[in-house]
Every structure is written in structure tokens, then in C-alpha cells.
Image (spheres, rainbow, N blue to C red):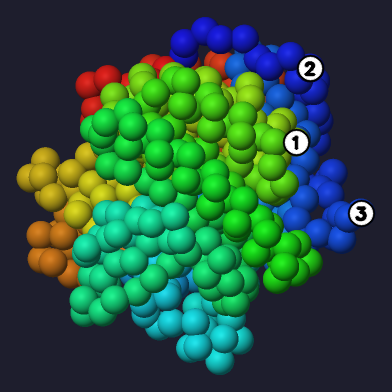
Amino acid sequence: MSPFAPAAGKPQHGCGDAADVAPSVHAEDGTAFAFAVVATDMTSFARRGVLTTRRGAVQTPAFMPVGTQATVKTLLPREVREVGAEILLCNTYHLMLRPGLGTLVAAGGLHAFMGWQGPILTDSGGFQIFSLAGNARVRESGVTFRSHIDGSPHHLDPETAVALQLGWGSDIVMALDHLVGLPAEYEAVRDATERTHRWLDRCIDAFEDQGGKLRSALFGICQGGMDSALRTASARALAEVDVAGCAIGGLSVGEPKPVMAEMLELVAPILPPDKPRYLMGVGSPEDLWMGAARGVDMFDCVLPTRLARNGALFTPDGRVNIKQRRFADRHESLDSECDCEACTGFSAAYLHHLFRARELLGLRLASLHNLRFLARQMAAIRASIDAGRFGTAHASFMDRYRPVAATVAG
């Protein structure tokens, strides 16, 4: 882990379970959201907290499985909960196209529709618009695009993004941001970053006008690409506005991992210490430890379930391909340390057979395993912060785990 000092004025180590000191769902200002830091690491920015919504508490640092289209692929909501997930991410772009706001409202909201009773964070759809949609056109008013499903035209602006998320009952609403693909010219990154903050002001006004604080929480997003000055300025702008949490976007988009770590080290001391920090789109085990060391409280990514459906499974020693011939005669669990159903009920040879035979059960068991592996990593991170040994635990993990990428952030 690269050496950097913890922020000045950091609280001392807490004790006990964070749930014991969880703030009430309705804070003194009447909002339906609260966040408290209950322990910190003295050698890094790592911190232990609890995020409270009207649908329950989330222990942080936390990983959010992605249910893009109101489902975590192949899994029942009960199974997702049982692997240790306390909060899910769903996506505005996909939900607005299919099934649409009307269907979700008629169903009683997104939670009832998908059978998940815990908290849900919804991404505003900015990333998907620029990565999936056709003919996207950005103007100051908003963005027009064509659906990747049927080519139909659509318009999304900051006010609509907020209205949609509140309409289907999101517990955490993400502001609409402008993301540009990298590499990009400095001027393009600067313009998108500045537009993100102008759109955030509009999201804040819309959230207030629609009574959002009584039902949900609004998070803003820090952008700035890989430019240190833009990234720092964006973090400072985000720190000054009335949002409940601060997301860090535009990372894990192909840049070297040390660069991602550098950007996090820039913004961590700037973002308010009393608000949760959410690193968007990051889900590799080594990156979860790296992000936690730099003060991140929340993560999400499709990576663990997408990898699982392709036979790539996490183990304490690194990622393996269960379809490889070497697993055909391994009549023992894939990971003897794991308590998921795939590892306690079946052998590595059986998992290998399921994938080679293209049986759907293989996709389910692999998805359960990868999500459980990440949940166990997050639990280990939280426990190590509580015990005042995060640095030792991080080093121990990295000594054993071998990431796929050649360059990783320490």
C-alpha cells in the first residue's frame, strides 16, 4: 500500500458493532437517511461506518451487487441477501426503457416489483447512455439518445432523472452526470465535469421540490477524468453542495490501477468526512481493499456476476477459470474457506462439469460464490478496521491474492 497520511482530525477507533450506534432513520432535519463513522484506521483513510435508510441499515464499507434490470442475474432476492448483501444497485437507463415508470408505480414501486425489501441505490443512467445508447447528443438542457433495444428516441435531463428515481422508490438517488470516454481531450473532460456540476445544482433543486429528503437521499458525483487539477476542483465543488453522499465516477474505465489509486488519494481528504463516499463501477477484490484504504465506503460492479457466468471464480489465491481441464478431477470444494452453497454443497469437479455441459445451475452457483467471496472480503475489511489492524489485514490479503492484471494498486 502506498504511504499516505490519514486526514487531520480523524476520529479514534470505535468499538463494538456499528449497528449498535446506528443513527435513526429520520434525522433531526426530518431526512430519511443518515450516516455515521464509528471507527477509523490510523495508518490510512480506511473507516468503518453505518448507513441508515428507511428500509434498513448498511454496514460500511459495503459492496452493492448490481441488479441492472431489477434482478441480479440468475439469483433470487433471498439468495442475494443470504450471501451477505444489504443493498442493491439498479439502473435508471434500463428501468426507464423497460419496464418503464408506469409499470413500476402500478406494482407498488421497484422494491415490491423485484421482491427486494432492503435498500436500493439507483444509478442515474449517465454511464449507460454514453456506453450503450445510440446517437447520444448532449446539450445543456439534457441528453437525447436512442434506445439500444428498439432505437426509439428518448430524452433525459437532471429533473427527469430525479423524478424517475423518486417515482419508483429509490432509497439513494444518483444525480445525472456527464461522462466522456477516455482518452479524451482536456477541453472535453473539463466541459463534461463542469456540466456535471451544473446538472447537480438542478438535481438538488428538483430533489428538494419533490420532497425527496423525506423519502430518499441524493448523491452527487465527482468527475474530472485523470487530470489531477480537474479531479480536485470537482471534489471541492461537490463538497460544498447539499447532498447526502459523494460518489466518485469516471474511474475504472481502463486507466492503470495506480492512476485510479492516485485519483482517490486526491479526493479523499477533500470530500466531507461525515458523508459516505461511493466509488462507482469497481468490484475486483484487490480494488475493494485498495479503495477502502483510501476512505471509500461503498462500491458496486457487475464484474463478480458477469465473471461468474463465464466461469471465472474468485479464490483466496486469485481468480480461476473453472472450465479448465485441471478442475475435472478435483473432487473437493473449490474454496475450502468459503461457506457459500457452491463450496459447501458441491465439488470443483461438479462445477467444472456444469460449465462444460452448459447447465444453468453452474451460472447460479458461480454467481453465488463470487458474491459471497466479495461479501466475505467486505466483512474482513470491516472487522480489521474495528480491531485496529486494517494495514496488516490488507497486506496479508495482497501477499496471497494474485490479481489478473499485472499492475495493481497497493
- Disc number placed over residue 388 in the picture, else none: none
Task: Report helix, strand or loop for mark 2.
Answer: loop
Q: State the quadrant of the C terminus.
A: top left
For disc 3, the marked residue is 28
Q: Residue furthest left?
A: 325
Mark 3–mark 2 distance (CA, rounded to whole Å): 24 Å
The amino acid sitting under disc 1 is: Asp
For disc 1, the marked residue is 274
Quadrant in the rendering for residue 268? top right
Residue 285 position within the rendered picture, expressed as x and y whole percent measured from the top left: 40, 35
Task: Report helix, strand or loop for mark 3.
Answer: loop
Q: Are marks 2 and 1 in contact (CB under 8 Å)?
A: no
Quadrant in the rendering for residue 7? top right
Q: Residue furthest front?
A: 140
Residue 277 position within the rendered picture, expressed as x and y whole percent measured from the top left: 60, 38
Residue 142 position within the rendered picture, expressed as x and y whole percent measured from the top left: 43, 61
The amino acid sitting under disc 3 is: Glu
Given residues 41 and 68, the one toward you in this image is: 68
